[in-house]
Image (spheres, grey):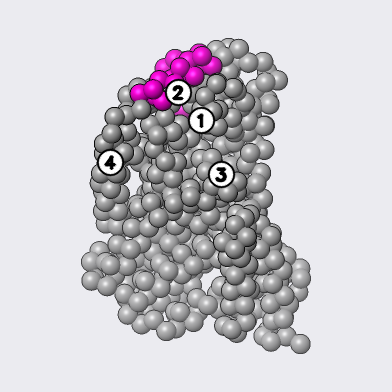
């Protein structure tokens, strides 16, 4: 006996059941057992959501299609993950990452490092249009430099995440930056301009914090012995040259020329593989091994070995499996109407613009947390809140900004989200090995969580909150009549 017709939302109480139980299971697994492997709780979440779907009149085939549809949409992102794994392995083997670390240790200072690292990641991400590509390449090199300066990994990771995901957020080449205006039927460049009032202050505040913190790290005498040991280990293990930075420069150059991300990253893999063979003396079989299983070296410095012994497609499989399960859970929640039922209750109860804008941001954050998918956290609230903005007479540009701030830049702060899982793996934070202190990168990624806070503040004081243009109002009326 079904509780609702096939296409209806489940009752709000029933819709909350799989979400609450899954979050409870995640809490037990991570905080009670101290085991950061969210895979099984999320898989159980798919089963619980499927039961709700069957109870409300859906067939198993319908639920299954919903699960696999969202997973299929993620395949381009999974492809980027595989390529980043190959890039990490081959760029280390080529000497590209070691060269970046070597010159970074020589040119930067501990005081300026965090602020400079955030700025560098934001520039590269803006050019590439992909936060993941930035984290897996430049971010990896910055982790090595930070290790050489004796800066805790979670501080370096926070600066990398702040820069990479904010550059991605306002890049016209970014998939999420294009998705938000597409869902809300707004102009891409109008959307980017409307994000600047929250993006720029958040970045400036984060920059000042990293600058001040960096000087605290640099209060004492820098560990020249540690830095020299790192540089000596790199010199003895790799042939270093500024020319070895060509793969990184080429990938950025292709991005500036608006080449698609996947072929651009693959070209970076090919060039690095050639350098590994002709400059570092690797064999073709060695390069294949590095691209698949990662690079391996013994430099004599334990901390450097941990940085250099990584990469390869196989290093990404833990992350990919987590992403696929999390996205499957998100797809099940969407197809069964559980998420829509909750959002529908919110949209009926909020009346003021401030309440609507706050609800849109928090709904995107909640969808990110529950469904583990930044794309779903933009698309679903974007679709559900559109009529509300039209009704109250405010531009849907506000909605596009809300979904980006609750979706794109919050995703790396949720460990089981696609963004968070990738950050943890690519930067070698080793959370699954029990290094839970590295989760401190989450509150320290100031630029990511400050933007939605600033956006909510604007909504309540009425700043940078454009009203609907005349054409939006006319279109809304025509849609309502139809």
- Going from N to C along the chain, the mark reached first, 4 or 2, is 4
User: How many residues crowd mark 1 within 10 Å: few (<14), some (14–19), many (20+)?
Assistant: few
Task: Name the disc covering residue 335, or none.
Answer: none
Disc 1 versus disc 3: distance between alpha carbons? 14 Å
Mark positioned earlier in the residue sequence (2 or 1): 2
Residue for badge 2:
230
- Could you classify mark 3 by the number of other residues whose Cα lies within 10 Å: few (under 14), some (14-19), or many (20 or more)? some
Label at residue 216: 4
- Residue for badge 1: 303
Q: Where does residue 160 sit, x and y in percent of width and height?
A: 41, 42
| Viewer-closest of 38 and 347 | 38
Q: In this view, does 180 lie to the left or right of 392?
A: right
Query: Which residue is found at the position 46% from the left and 27% from the top?
Result: 248
Q: Give the range drawn in magenta.
A: 224-252
Q: Are marks 2 and 1 in contact (CB under 8 Å)?
A: yes
Q: Is mark 1 on a helix, strand or loop?
A: helix
The image position of residue 207, as x and y in percent, is 28, 45
């Amino acid at each position: 006996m079904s509780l609702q017709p096939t296409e209806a939302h489940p009752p709000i109480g029933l819709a909350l059941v799989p979400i609450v139980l899954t979050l409870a299971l995640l809490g037990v697994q991570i905080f009670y057992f101290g085991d950061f492997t969210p895979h099984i709780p999320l898989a159980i979440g798919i089963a619980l959501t499927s039961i709700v779907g069957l109870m409300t009149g859906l067939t198993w085939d319908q639920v299954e299609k919903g699960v696999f549809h969202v997973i299929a949409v993620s395949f381009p992102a999974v492809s980027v993950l595989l390529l980043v794994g190959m890039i990490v392995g081959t760029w280390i083997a080529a000497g590209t990452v070691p060269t970046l670390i070597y010159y970074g240790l020589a040119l930067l200072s501990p005081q300026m490092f965090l602020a400079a690292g955030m700025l560098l990641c934001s520039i590269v991400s803006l050019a590439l249009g992909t936060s993941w590509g930035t984290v897996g390449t430049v971010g990896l090199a910055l982790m090595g430099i930070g290790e050489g300066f004796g800066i805790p990994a979670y501080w370096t990771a926070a600066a990398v995440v702040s820069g990479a995901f904010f550059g991605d957020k306002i890049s016209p080449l970014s998939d999420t930056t294009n998705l938000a205006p597409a869902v809300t039927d707004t102009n891409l460049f109008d959307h980017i301009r409307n994000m600047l009032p929250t993006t720029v202050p958040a970045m400036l505040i984060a920059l000042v914090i990293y600058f001040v913190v960096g000087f605290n790290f640099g209060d004492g005498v820098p560990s020249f012995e540690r830095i020299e040991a790192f540089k000596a280990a790199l010199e003895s293990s790799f042939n270093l040259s500024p020319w070895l930075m060509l793969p990184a420069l080429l990938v950025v150059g292709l991005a500036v020329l608006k080449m698609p991300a996947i072929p651009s990253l693959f070209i970076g893999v090919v060039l690095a593989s050639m350098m590994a063979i002709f400059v570092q003396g690797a064999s073709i079989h060695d390069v294949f091994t590095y691209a698949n299983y990662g690079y391996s070296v013994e430099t004599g410095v334990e901390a450097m070995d941990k940085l250099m012994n990584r990469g390869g497609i196989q290093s990404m499989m833990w992350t990919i499996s987590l992403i696929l399960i999390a996205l499957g859970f998100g797809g099940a929640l969407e197809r069964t109407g559980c998420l829509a039922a909750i959002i529908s209750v919110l949209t009926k109860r909020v009346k003021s613009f401030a309440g609507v804008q706050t609800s849109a941001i928090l709904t995107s954050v909640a969808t990110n947390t529950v469904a583990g998918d930044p794309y779903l956290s933009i698309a679903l609230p974007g679709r559900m809140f559109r009529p509300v903005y039209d009704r109250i007479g405010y531009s849907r540009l506000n909605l596009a900004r809300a979904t980006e701030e609750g979706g794109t830049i919050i995703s790396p702060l949720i460990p089981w989200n696609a963004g968070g899982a990738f950050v943890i793996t690519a930067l070698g934070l080793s959370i699954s090995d029990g290094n839970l202190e590295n989760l401190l990168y989450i509150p320290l990624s100031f630029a990511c969580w400050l933007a939605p806070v600033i956006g909510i503040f604007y909504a309540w004081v009425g700043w940078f909150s454009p009203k609907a243009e005349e054409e939006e109002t006319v279109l809304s009326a025509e849609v309502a009549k139809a």
